[in-house]
Amino acid sequence: MTLIAIILATLAAGIGSVWVAAALLRLGMGTRQRVGPQHLLSLAAGALLATAFMHLLPEAFESQASAHDLFATLLLGLVFFFLLDKAELWHHGHEHSPSERHIHGQGHHDHHPDHAHDHHHGPGQHGHGGWALLTGDSVHCFGDGVLIASAFMADMRLGVVAALSVLAHEVPHHIGDLVVLRHSIRHRNAALLKVSLAGALTALGGLVGYYLVGLWDGGLPYFLAIASSSFVYVALADLIPQLQKRLSAAQTLAQIAWLAAGIAVVTFVSGLAHAH
């Protein structure tokens, strides 16, 4: 039953987030809308932080594992994801000519809606960089699947919350991915298919995570701590910096409201799970 739930949840988070992103693009997302990319990023950041601090970490610390060891795992996880991010930036920086790196700014390849339109592909560059983007997405989705499986192994409701949080933060990422790929691939449906295939690797990560946690007896709290470090890193190093812009008072209040909404929804679900 748990394995079936993991497969369904990882498919929903991995492929579902791509389809939601495509639907939002079809409705005009990525332009100045009442509900725009900034709002989705705020919602995702709030959901990820609340999932880590209100749900995953409390579940890990309720175990018999040492608090010192769990904090050490959390710290190592943050450093690992930082180094992984640096490695991706370094790799991408070598894929572009100096003029292209000047356009992208420090060789930083952002996959988010606010930066998606900064990608310029000239004639004859169809597909250039697309496979690198898809490879990075695939690895990221695989890791998400392992983290979702860890949450499900601790508690079914915790797994559902983790899957929803992953879906929330992947939607704005995939909007950017689709915009970039549609500039480098002639057919719009081909871009959707390729990003969906990358998202499907979330389910493979879920299967691997299920067997990893099963093989390592007592390792579940540490997997939860690693999952928390991933969520915290993505929120603080990736999403929130994109929200740190000079905005009007109304736009700032909207950001805060959507951030609070993400926190409130996850906290409410977490409260229900613990009360149950």
Image (tube, rainbow, N blue to C red):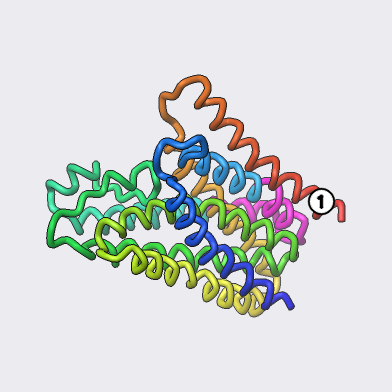
201 vs 268: above or below: below
Of 129 and 76, the residue lying toward us? 129
> Does the magenta stretch mainly form a helix, a strand or a loop?
helix
**Which amino acid type corresponds to the residue marked 1 in the rendered image?**
Leu
Of 220 and 173, the residue lying toward us? 173
Of 20 and 100, the residue lying toward us? 20
Q: Residue at x 55, y 67 (%)?
A: 145
**Quadrant in which residue 87 is drawn:** bottom left
In the image, is 143 to the left or to the right of 195?
A: right
Residue 135 seen in the current view: no
Q: Residue at x 48, y 61 (%)?
A: 18
Residue on which disc 1 sits: 272
**Quadrant occupied by the C terminus:** bottom right
Of 36 and 1, the residue lying toward us? 36
**Quadrant occupied by the N terminus:** bottom right
Residue 82 seen in the current view: yes
In the image, is 188 to the left or to the right of 214?
A: left
Locate residue 132, reporting x and y percent.
29, 64
Q: Secondary structure at mark 1?
A: helix
Q: Residue at x 64, y 79 (%)?
A: 215
Locate residue 78, reporting x and y percent.
50, 51
In the image, is residue 201 part of the stretch drawn in magenta?
Answer: no
In the image, is residue 72 part of the stretch drawn in magenta?
Answer: yes
How packed is label 1: few (under 14 Cα within 10 Å), some, or many (20 or more)? Answer: few
Q: Provide the residue span drawn in magenta.
A: 53-75
Locate residue 169, reporting x and y percent.
52, 51
